[in-house]
Structures are given as structure tokens and as C-alpha cells.
Amino acid sequence: MHIFSRHRVRPALTSISIWTFLVLASCLALYQLWVYLDVHAPHVANALAGGMVAAGATALGTVPVMFSHSLSERTQDCLFGFGAGVMLAAVAFSLVLPGLNAAGELGHGKWGAGLVVGGAILLGAAALLFLDRVLPHEHFIKGREGKEAAKLRRTWLFVFAIALHNLPEGLAIGVGYVGGDVVQGSALATGIAIQDVPEGMVVALALLAAGYSRSFSVALGMLSGLVEPLGAVLGAVVVGWSTALLPWGLGFAGGAMLFVISHEIIPESHRKGHEVHATTGLMLGFVLMMLLDTALG
């Protein structure tokens, strides 16, 4: 019995070592990228740093999963709602309103600014809808969706789902730093990071509940956050080419986030019958992000 236990422990330790190495190697590569960008493109470096903060918050949220086996459905739904509230406030106060102001500074009137940002919001939502239809992925509760989903392993379906969820958050962080207002960009990154902590926990727990090993669930939960700094760099680079793209970029990121909130997070939080707790979490998250935005911005 002793020999059997020892043979079971060694593969588990090897698996943990491999995933730890992948996480540390990814973080080191991003740090080297930040050092380079800090010299050649400071606004992109700021965006990358903001994205790394959000990724770190996601990783932090996975830590309790190393020691805990489960999280009640009611608590999960409350956390989903909280994340949705934070993201809603971020869209309103850190993306849409600055986008309208940026459009106004470019010479657009009130109607023109509204049409520019409104059009960008619809484009952002349409882009996420396109990805949602083309890429196979799996909701944590709802199940599989997308083209040829049945032919892919569940692991990669979860990976696609996590990427779809985190990409617009990263884009929003990157665009938030382009306007030159580091404080506003930092406020947005802080708000997204706050909601990423419970999100990282829920992702890791969902993978654990789906039958994956604890080390794999925690490691993939941590790695899922790295989509955000990559998205932040993409957003900062694209919008940084021209100030005329700023209101479009802010609106696009806002529309992508609104799509994720409405299509993914809120339905997931209401699916198991805990709508009141999910809505309470949403209200608390919205107010917290509003206070952070007004206090820091």
C-alpha cells in the first residue's frame, strides 16, 4: 500500500512541476516584452502592465482551489453576478463616457460622437458574436457550442471559452491606456482585476468539477489570465496608430465586454435558480467599480 501511494504521488508532483514551469516561463516572457516596450512604446508597456495585473488577479483567485474541493452554487452565482456588475460599470464609466469625450475632442458634435461610439459598440459585439459562432467552445454550465464542437476534447473547449471571455477585458485595458490618461487606464485595470479574482476561482473549480486534475485545473486557470495582457497589447498597438481610432477602440472594447456580460456571465449566474444572489452581487460589483472609477479617475 505504501509503494502504491508513492507511485501515485510522483506523477502528481511531476504534473505540478510541469504546469508551474509553464506558468513561470509565460510570466518571464511577458516581463521581457514589457522591458522592451517600456523603452520603445511606453503606452503599450503601461497596457501590458495593466494586463499583467489582471492576469495576476486571475492567478490569485485559483490559489484557494489548491486547498478547497468545492464552492457552493449560490456562491458561484453571486461571484458571477459581482463580476458582471464590475464589468458593466467599467463599460459605462471607463469606456463609453471616455469614448464620447474623445469623439467630441476630435470635432464630432453630440450626435456624431454618439453615432461613432454607438457604431463601435455594435461592431465590438458583432465581432464577439462572430467568434462565438465560429470557434467551438464550452460554457461551464450550458455546455458545448460552436462549429464541430463534438470533435474537440473538453479541455480545449474550455480553453476557447476562457479566451473568448478574457479577450475583450484585455482589449479594454489596452485601449484605456492609449488616451494618455494613465490614472484612468489604471482605474479600469484595477476594476477588471478585482472581478478577475473570483473569476479565476470559478474557472479552476469548474475545471476541477469537470474531472480534470487539481494541478491542471489550477494551472489552466492561471494561464487563462495571460490572454488579458496579450489582448491589452493588441488594443494599445492598434488604437495607438491614430488618435482618431481612440473613440472607436473604446466603443469596440465596450461592445465586446457587453456581449460577454449579456451572453455569458449573466445567463450563467441565473441558470441554477440563484437569481437574487446573482443580482445582489451584480449591484455590489457595479457600485464598487463606480466608486473606484470616480475616486481614481
Image (cartoon, rainbow, N blue to C red):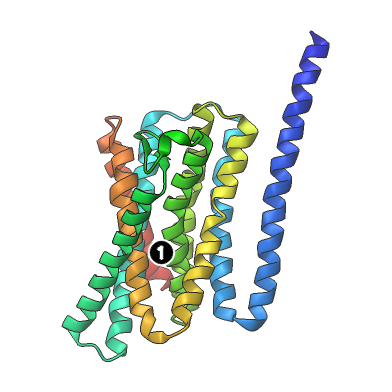
Residue 3 is situated, as x and y percent measured from the top left of the image, at 83, 13
Q: Is residue 8 left or right of residue 103?
A: right
Give residue 87's quadrant in the image.
Answer: bottom left
Give the residue drawn at x 29%, y 60%.
126
Q: Is residue 187 left or right of residue 221?
A: left
Give residue 220's quadrant in the image.
Answer: top right
Residue 15 is situated, as x and y percent measured from the top left of the image, at 72, 34
Residue 101 is situated, as x and y percent measured from the top left of the image, at 30, 81
The extreme top residue here reads 1
Residue 294 is situated, as x and y percent measured from the top left of the image, at 36, 69
Q: Is residue 290 visible?
A: no
The extreme left residue here reads 111
The amino acid pointed to by label 1 is Leu
Give the residue drawn at x 59%, y 74%.
45
Give the residue drawn at x 69%, y 42%.
19
Q: Is residue 130 left or right of residue 138?
A: left
Give the residue drawn at x 59%, y 81%.
41
